[in-house]
Image (cartoon, rainbow, N blue to C red):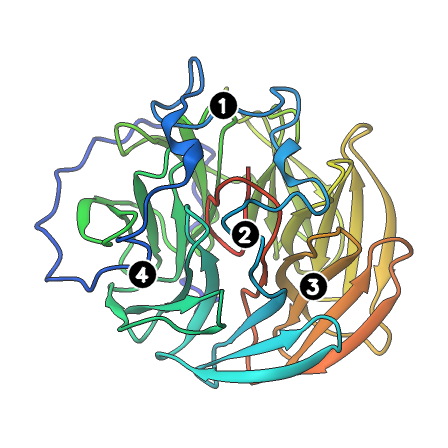
């Protein structure tokens, strides 16, 4: 989270935004480590009625069907199981061995790393060096830097279109969505936005649109993936709203948007992009993660040191897990076997390992200062949509 911008409250609106002209090409970006390798085998297939080139869902009734425990792609099957933690104030990535709950390596990276993001083809981990204006590639086979950093301005967060064609940089301070080649990171189109603090997103089941949260103006954007244009914009119906993580339900019908200021999640229909309603979860609601069986949503409440659990079928909160001694659970992911939820402790220089069977805290692991968007890797799934690991 950056410094908040003070803006006047506006009424809830739904407005069409004009398309934006492509920008000039990037200035000779360094190639991604995955450029010379062939694309994932699933790239050849297309989803009927979906985004052209997007692999069909394994189960139309469950967009996370490819994420079952241990269902690792052949691409990542031999990668070591590790947890990568970007420390925003230390300019490092701590690497944790989940078997011992200890830091086994510290990797120096660019200035203010915010998230560690798996590439669409699963072969590279990109460290988003936000104030360093670079993406640092890590080879998940060796857990070491894979090559020179790629110049990318203001890479607060990073996503990939479901067909693997583009990377989408959430340039928060620049107020832009920047579409880049998913392999070379060359700029393909810059989309200026009128909201403040674009930061998190998720894609519709058919991949044809994605919804973006704007942290500092309390707004949401709906973006046409193929056209690379904002097609709708809405202000959340709460003064001072600060939307964060975005996640779609397994059946693709319901969207959840975490909101730190509202202390809960906004719930809406993404297709109609209608007025959302608020489900309160806990103070500082921040990160959203789906269980390996697609039954539950884990919700980190950063302001109170807890994790709420939502039952997707009923739409109700069914339990809350408190971290002993408190903490600041932020971003993270679920282990490949689904047994451990890993979350960074943003203001406590630590990482939490939480047992998903009963919610007890297994370990608190000391790391660098300001740990943020950690990635558990590898995880099940055929391809990555970005952030700390959204797999389908």
Disc with the residue nearer the chain's start (4 vs 1)? 4
Badge number at residue 389:
2
Hey, which quadrant is residue 5 in on the image? Answer: bottom left
Badge number at residue 317:
none
Element at badge 2?
loop
Q: Nearer the viewer, residue 135 or 252?
A: 135
Could you tell me how many numbered marks the image carries? 4
Callout 4 crowding tier (Cα within 10 Å): few <14, some 14–19, many ≥20:
some
Q: Is residue 289 left or right of residue 233?
A: right
Q: Nearer the viewer, mark 4 or mark 1?
A: 4
How far apart marks 1 and 3 lie (CA) works out to: 29 Å
Q: Nearer the viewer, mark 2 or mark 1?
A: 1
- Tell me if I can see residue 241 in this picture: no
How far apart marks 2 and 3 lie (CA) works out to: 12 Å
Residue sitting at x 66%, y 44%? 265
Residue sitting at x 75%, y 52%? 337
How far apart marks 4 and 3 lie (CA) works out to: 27 Å
The x, y position of residue 79, in whole percent, is: 56, 61
Disc with the residue nearer the chain's start (4 vs 3)? 4
How far apart marks 2 and 1 lie (CA) works out to: 19 Å
Q: Nearer the viewer, mark 4 or mark 3?
A: 4
Residue behind mark 3: 342
How far apart marks 4 and 1 lie (CA) works out to: 26 Å
Q: Nearer the viewer, residue 284 or 169?
A: 169
Element at badge 4?
loop
Residue contact between numbered discs 2 and 1, judged by CB atoms under 8 Å:
no
Disc with the residue nearer the chain's start (1 vs 3)? 1
Q: Nearer the viewer, mark 1 or mark 3?
A: 1
Residue behind mark 1: 56
């Amino acid at each position: 989270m950056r410094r908040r911008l003070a803006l006047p409250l506006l009424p809830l609106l739904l407005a069409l935004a004009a398309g934006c002209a492509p920008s000039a090409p990037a200035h000779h970006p360094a190639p991604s480590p995955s450029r010379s390798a062939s694309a994932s085998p699933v790239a050849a297939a297309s989803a009927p009625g979906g985004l052209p080139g997007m692999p069909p869902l394994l189960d139309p009734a469950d967009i996370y069907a490819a994420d079952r425990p241990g269902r690792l792609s052949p691409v990542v099957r031999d990668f070591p199981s590790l947890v990568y933690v970007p420390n925003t104030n230390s300019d490092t990535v701590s690497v944790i061995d989940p078997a011992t709950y200890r830091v086994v390596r510290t990797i120096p990276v660019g200035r203010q790393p915010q998230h560690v993001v798996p590439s669409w083809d699963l072969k590279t981990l990109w460290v988003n060096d936000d104030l360093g204006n670079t993406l640092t590639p890590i080879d998940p086979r060796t857990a070491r830097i894979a090559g020179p950093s790629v110049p990318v301005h203001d890479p607060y967060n990073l996503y990939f279109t479901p067909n693997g064609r583009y990377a989408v940089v959430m340039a928060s301070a620049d107020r832009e969505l920047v579409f880049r080649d998913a392999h070379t990171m060359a700029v393909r189109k810059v989309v200026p936005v009128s909201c403040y603090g674009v930061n998190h997103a998720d894609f519709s089941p058919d991949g044809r649109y994605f919804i973006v949260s704007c942290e500092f103006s309390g707004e949401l954007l709906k973006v046409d993936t193929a056209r690379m244009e904002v097609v709708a914009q809405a202000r959340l119906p709460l003064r001072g709203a600060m939307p964060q993580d975005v996640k779609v339900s397994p059946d693709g019908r319901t969207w959840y948007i975490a909101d730190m200021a509202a202390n809960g999640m906004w719930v809406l229909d993404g297709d109609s992009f209608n007025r959302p309603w608020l489900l309160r979860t806990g103070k500082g609601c921040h990160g959203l993660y789906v269980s390996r069986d697609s039954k539950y949503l884990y919700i980190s409440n950063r302001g109170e040191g807890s994790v709420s659990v939502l039952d997707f079928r009923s739409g109700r909160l069914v339990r809350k897990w408190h971290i002993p001694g408190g903490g600041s659970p932020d971003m993270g992911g679920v282990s490949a076997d689904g047994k451990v939820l890993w979350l960074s402790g943003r203001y406590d220089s630590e990482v939490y390992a939480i047992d998903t069977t009963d919610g007890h805290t297994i370990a608190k692991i000391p790391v660098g200062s300001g740990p943020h968007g950690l990635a558990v890797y590898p995880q099940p799934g055929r391809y990555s949509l970005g952030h700390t690991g959204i797999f389908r």
